[in-house]
Amino acid sequence: MALVAPYSKYRRNNLTILIVVCLVCAGWFYKDGYHNEEFIAKHTQEDGTADSTLAFNQKSPPIFLAGAIISGILLFVVKGRKIVAQESELVIDGKKKIAYDSIQQIDKTNLDPDGIKGYFVLTYKNVAGNEEHEKISAKSYDNLPAIVGELASKIS
């Protein structure tokens, strides 16, 4: 049975929070910049031009909307990322496949035993025979201790 380390729930939640904050800010600044007569009167100078606060509230909503859209696209892109420890290889994000017999070393000195903080580094030989390093962070993936345990048992 393959072990799976999905993309970090912490990072997915942060992107979701960022989307909500950007949408709320865009709505708030749009309302104050265009529809709140009291705010507009308070931040309009005597010559009829907007001061910096009103100008910001009128110009920033599209930027906040763009931030929400970009964060949504990023959330959609990273949602399917995962590390899968299969029978004969480690598959990272469905793209990079590392055979267990090509792994030379697992450096887990910077990974906490509970797997919440830190990272581990895989040293392996690629198909061309060159030595490569793959750094996998606990901030990016959940369930890393199980993956490291599986790797240690497979390469021993």
Image: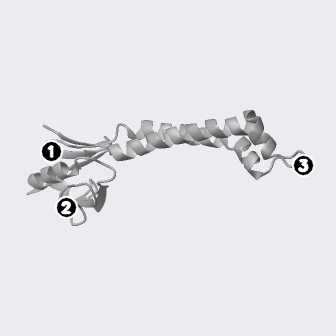
Q: Nearer the viewer, mark 2 or mark 3?
A: 3
Residue type indicated by callout 3: Glu
**Which residue shows up at 46% across the image and 42% down it?**
17
Quadrant of the image occupied by residue 26: top right
Q: Cα distance, mark 1 to mark 2? A: 16 Å
Q: Amino acid at mark 2?
A: Ile
In-image side of 119 versus 148 (left or right):
right
Residue at which label 2 appears:
106
Between the residue at mark 2 and the residue at mark 3, the CA separation in whole angstroms equals 68 Å
- Which residue position is annotated with label 3? 46
Helix, strand or loop at mark 2: strand
Pinpoint residue 46: horizontal percent, then vertical percent. Answer: 90, 49
Question: At 83% from the left edge and 46% from the top edge, which residue is drawn?
Answer: 44
User: Who is closer to the viewer here, 108 or 151?
Assistant: 108
How many residues crowd around disc 2 within 10 Å: few (fewer than 14), some, or many (20 or more)?
A: some
| Residue bearing the label numbered 1 | 88
Please, what is the three-letter code of the amino acid marked with disc 1?
Ser
Label 3 neighbour load within 10 Å: few <14, some 14-19, many 20+: few
Q: Residue at x 8, y 57 (%)?
A: 156
**Which label sits in the foreground, 3 or 1?**
3
Specify the quadrant that holds the N terminus: top left
Q: Earlier in the sequence, mark 2 or mark 3?
A: 3
Left of 143 or right of it: where is 21?
A: right
Please, what secondary structure does the residue beneath circle 1 have? loop
Q: Along the line of sight, which residue is nearer the eye, 61 or 4? A: 61
Q: Quadrant of residue 110?
A: bottom left
